[in-house]
Amino acid sequence: MAGAAIAAGRAPAEQAGRSAAGRQAVQTGLRQVGRLSGELDPLRRQLGMMSRRQPGCAALRAAHYGIGPVTAVAIWAELGDVHRFSSSDDVIRHTGLDITVYSSDARRSAGHLSRQGPGLLRWALHEAAKCTARPAAPDYRYYTAFRARRGAGLATLSVARKLARRCYHTLRELGEEALAPAA
């Protein structure tokens, strides 16, 4: 699937007016991208298969717009057993998407992300939240209203928090089945 995109980009990249050294550098780069894509495609297929067969991943994909095969596996793997969290607020703290607040003499202003959780989980939630910028998304109106007030970055962050809460509740409702091995 990525190979077609590489082939489509190869011709314009090779036809651009470059020196011999520039053309060689572009060709070397394109070969490397092709080699890496060849290694990544089987991994994407395996993650897709796991996300369809593992009950927790399948539930996340079915219940939440924007969560695909790779992000479902990442969210499921990083959240793990959600029963260890007492509430969805604890999940937000775990992800590192919570806002830090300093009540005493602070060196920076309040409002920065704590970033204390798994980076992979924050990435997956951010990627899924970016899908709300599409008009077909269920949270599109929320996203656009927030974006108009505070900007696209904070709107995506807000949707990522909502998505983390929803994922927590989805996995919690599944109970022990959410942790079952892929069939």
Image (cartoon, rainbow, N blue to C red):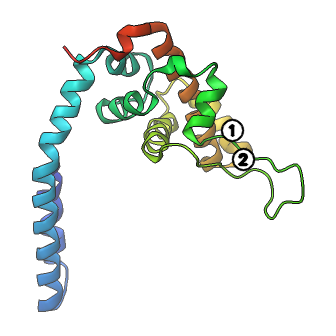
Pick the front one: 81 or 183: 81
Image side of residue 33 versus residue 83, left or right: left
Secondary structure category for the residue under label 1: helix
Residue placed at 63% from the left, 36% from the top? 93
For the residue marked with disc 1, what is the amino acid? Phe
Residue placed furthest toward the front: 84
- Report whether residue 180 is seen: yes
Image side of residue 147 versus residue 110, left or right: left
Task: Tell me, yes or no, whether the two marked residues, 2 and 1, touch with CB atoms within 8 Å.
Answer: yes
Image side of residue 120 versus residue 26, left or right: right
Image side of residue 139 versus residue 38, left or right: right
Residue underneath mark 1:
146
Position of residue 66 measured from the top left corner of the image (x, y, whole percent): 42, 30
Q: Which mark is residue 150?
A: 2
Pick the front one: 23 or 54: 54
Residue placed at 12% from the left, 41% from the top? 42
For the residue marked with disc 2, what is the amino acid? Arg
Position of residue 16 measured from the top left corner of the image (x, y, whole percent): 19, 79
Which quarter shows the C terminus? top left
